[in-house]
Image (cartoon, grey):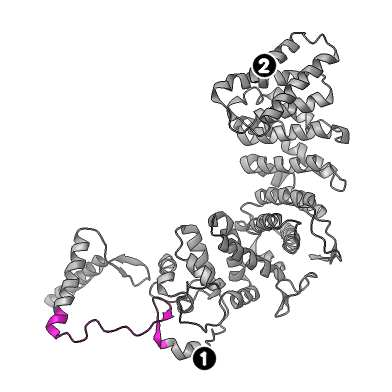
Amino acid sequence: MEREVVAALELEDGGGGGGDGDGDGELEQRLRAFNRQNSQTFNFDLKEQEERKKLCEEVLKALQKDQRRSCQATCLETIRILSRDKKVLAPLTTRPGMLLLMQLAGLECTQSSAPHASHSDVIIEALKCLCNMVFNSEMAQQLSVDLKLVIGICERLKKHRDKKLVHGIKFFDLRLLFLLSALRVDARTQLKEDLQGLLLLTDVLESTLDIKWSDKYVVARNDSSAPLSEEQVDFAIETLKALFNVTYDCSQQKVVEDQVHQFRYLTAILCHCLLLRAEAEGKTEEFYSHTINLLNNIPVSSLDLLFSPTIEFGVIDYNGKKMDTVEVLLAFMEKRIDRGTNLKEGLTPVLSVLTECSRTHKDMRKYIRSRVLPPLKDVKNRPEVGTTLRNKLVRLMTHIDTGVKHMAAEFLFVLCKESVDCLLKYTGYGNAAGLLAAHGLLAGGRGNGMYSEDEDTDTEEYKSVKSSINPITGHMEDPMPNPMAGMTEEQKEYEAMKLVNMFDKLSREQIIKPMRVKPDGTMGPLEEAADEYASDRDSTSHSDQEG
């Protein structure tokens, strides 16, 4: 198919079309047939690679002519299909090729005219081509920076901030901005520092969601309960993704005074996002997911707005604060846990937000603890057995993925105000051992966090059975028969020595390595203790001799 289209294009280029509209029409028909046949093709035949590369060159030549608009759109659709193949991009990733696509997309920096609605099909196809090329080619990324593509996108978004851009144009402008800022550090820096990307994209998100304000950082109540349109959700998600890139590492950097307002303003919008919904449940979850990802980049000092008492949409009151957004986060977390797949990407962002907020904001921690770790009553079952949020999170403490395991354990640890005794009460020593070892708290104590001194209260049910709870498993076990009952002292000594010899053999063969808890709460080889004992004994003996 590629060979036939190339032959037709070469004939057209050689003058076979006679210079009239018939040549254009025949070219368009052949390209449309190719496009229909390959519209869903993403894996290409290596044997036809050279033909595809040649086709790229010929279609680019055709685009450089003054073609009819419908033929331009068809040529661009062909380039979009071909640009899915990384190995045939060489003809496109040249300065003239990129400039041509930018001109057709209306993004050349010298281009001052606004995109016309009748040109939208050409503009959208050109933007799709640029997205594919930037995603698949480092050369295209470099040329995009050299030709100031980010500036062109931002100028168009600014110019049409309060006007309606054609859906596809705005969507792919934002998609292209996301790709460039994700793949190129210099493009991200330019967007963030030179083009005021945080302010611009926050404005785009605000206008997309039709937000009105009743007070500073307070979104006005909207009487309409209608869900967001599909168009609004699509725009919002692309904007959130670009904002994530712009704010990357911001939570770790010192925030200057003029940024405090911008972050608090954005947080108020993100809080509002979590109280909205899309028409489809899957879209709502995707919308929430990108909102939560962005919350991880916001300085935690600004996240008190998530439970502000002035939230007009809030109905869940706790100590005078509105906890509706927190409930959304908890429900999102539980849904991702229940799904059980892709937990690292799907679950750890929301765990991170909840953990850092709980570490910093007392009211949020107390509310979340009341939902996740309510006062213990049932201690007959192991902490990891059951369907409560506590049970589900404790199960994650021994998950095979280290990142998931660490985040779940850290979240529960913070809810316990980093008290080892409190954590063990809710999880058992066996589930918590990994976290305690990482923090150097195997010997007990507290973490380094600063928390209020209010005491943890035990229920009467817990107090009555506390002495019967196995601290390792974290639940009350039935009394076990004494395995040494009825043995003589000689028999007990024999069994003990047999066990010692078994451990010694396993240790010498390096099947196991006996460990101990060091005074600093970390783990260390048991042989160190023997060496330290021998050293202390020699030192004492030497001192006695000198005396």
Q: Position of residue 21 (x, y in %)?
A: 85, 15
Q: Which residue is mark 2?
A: 4
Query: What's under tag 2, amino acid-wise?
Result: Glu
82 left or right of 489 in image: right
Tag in front: 2 or 1: 2
Establish if 30 lies above or below 157: above
Q: Residue at x 78, y 72 (%)?
A: 310
Q: Position of residue 224 (x, y in %)?
A: 85, 63
Q: Nearer the viewer, residue 322 or 473?
A: 473
Query: What's under tag 1, amino acid-wise?
Result: Glu
Give the quarter of the image for residue 206.
Answer: bottom right
- What SS does tag 1 mark? helix
Estimate how packed mark 2 is, as few (under 14), some (14 to 19) or many (20 or more) residues with alpha carbons within 10 Å.
Answer: few
Note whether residue 539 is visible.
no
Q: Quadrant of the C terminus?
A: bottom left
Q: Which residue is mark 1?
A: 460
Q: Nearer the viewer, residue 311 or 247?
A: 311
Q: Quadrant of the N terminus?
A: top right
526 left or right of 331 in image: left
Q: Which residues are magenta?
A: 467-493
